[in-house]
Amino acid sequence: MGDSSGTEEGKEMTYSGGTVSASAVLANYPPLSRFATAPPLYFREEKVMKNIKCVDGKWIVDYSEKIPGAFVDRTDAKGRIRRVAKLRRVRVAFATKTEAQNHLAVVVGRKAGKALGIEVPAATKPVDVLLADFAETVISQQTEVRPKTLSDQRNSLKALMRSPLFKDKTLSQVTTEAIALYHAERGTNHKSSANSELCLLKLVLRKAVEWGKLDRNPADTVKPYRSELTRLRILTDEEAELLLNAATPQLVPVLRLLLTTAMRPHEVFNLYWANDGWENEKKLTTAILSLEKKRIFIPGDLAKNGKDRWVSLSADLVRMFRGLSRIEGAAKVFPYKNCPYGFGAAVRAAGLKNVTLYTLKHTACSTMIADGTDIVTVSEIVGHADIKMTARYCHSCDKSKLDAVERISRHYFKDAPVVDRPAEPSEARQEARQTAN
């Protein structure tokens, strides 16, 4: 709970302890104990509760107090000018109604003592919480986030604590100026990291406001850097063939699966054979390959967007999986935890540059769209949370633009001869890839 300290900054003095009632405040101080059983006007319940309101889930204590040494001239009903004390408005937010009532009880008790000429001592201010400790509490209490997200948040917290702007600082010592300065310095060379760390600060300080640790979020006005989408590396049909020919026989099925389903690498390396009763399991954290259904199930805990999805398998993929030599007792489809060492060797042997496993996913998305698959279907196959991410793979080419104009021209130039034949899908795909690269 808090009470105004009467300083020019208008900061709030925080009170610790349990429930405090109006009569308890009076009873704690002998000069005021006689009012505990017969509270004066200050402590009438209906008058006190007018100063407490619930706004957007927060309990607001709203009252006024005199500014020491400040006066203002007022004209009364009879036209006489009277000098009265100048007041200022104080509003304090609390998470619960009890905290707001306790706070107001202490405020009214101090006003009552002052009216009787008795100075009621202010309560002590509790120890402020360290930013690092509070941030770790916020991170650990999140339940509906992926493990990788928690790991990224802890890495961001470590980076923040390496800066003297935040190291060993309490919540109340974190200022908007410090956050803006850190964000500008960090963003000079690492804009993506700066945005991630700013996002964590916003989350932690927002929770501090919600839990009554702060009155406002100092990170609210600091804006993140605009994300710059990098140019996607798309393989041509010839480059994909060179890569498959250079790969080892054990690696080829992995590459073919990435090139045809646009699955993410971590989904492929967490792919397990379907066992009896897997559909009845309440929570799955691995992808399941069902040759009976000719589909792959990717649970929300593994998917990037947090939603379950199915990936259909073509007849060629089903034959490929049936032909794999399954090790007895092994549940995983591929014996890799992450990107195998042989992939880098295959890329070098094929003479390719700037190729990663995600390049194969990008190639699959681009190929689907270039072959005429609508963007909504591609977005559902890949598992994008926003269709704008899928739109990155829509690359137009000069030939496609010319064909579009030619087709619509036929509606208005019916007697005109056809200038060029429509581009074949393979030709349009190759030109689109060259445009993307």
Image (cartoon, helix red, strand yellow):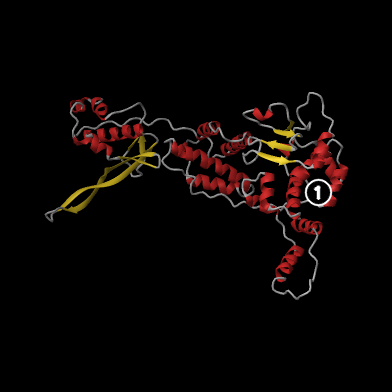
Residue furthest out toward the front: 414
Q: Quadrant of the C terminus?
A: bottom right
Residue 126 horizontal side relative to residue 304, left or right: left
Count neighbours of disc 1 (C-alpha within 10 A) and say few if under 14, some if 14 to 19, many if 20 or more. few
Residue sitting at x 81%, y 56%: 426
Q: Could you say where residue 383 lies in the image, as x and y percent from the top left?
A: 66, 44
Q: Could you say where residue 271 lies in the image, as x and y percent from the top left?
A: 73, 33
When asked about the image quadrant of residue 274, the answer is: top right
Above or below 335: residue 409: below
Q: Is residue 233 visible?
A: no
Above or below 371: residue 249: above
Residue sitting at x 26%, y 28%: 25
When asked about the image quadrant of residue 263, the answer is: top right
Residue sitting at x 28%, y 35%: 107
When asked about the image quadrant of residue 264, the answer is: top right
Above or below 9: residue 340: above
Above or below 410: residue 184: above
Nearer to me, 83 or 201: 201
Residue designated by label 1 = 353
Q: Is residue 160 visible?
A: yes
Q: Quadrant of the N terminus?
A: top left
Nearer to me, 92 or 335: 335
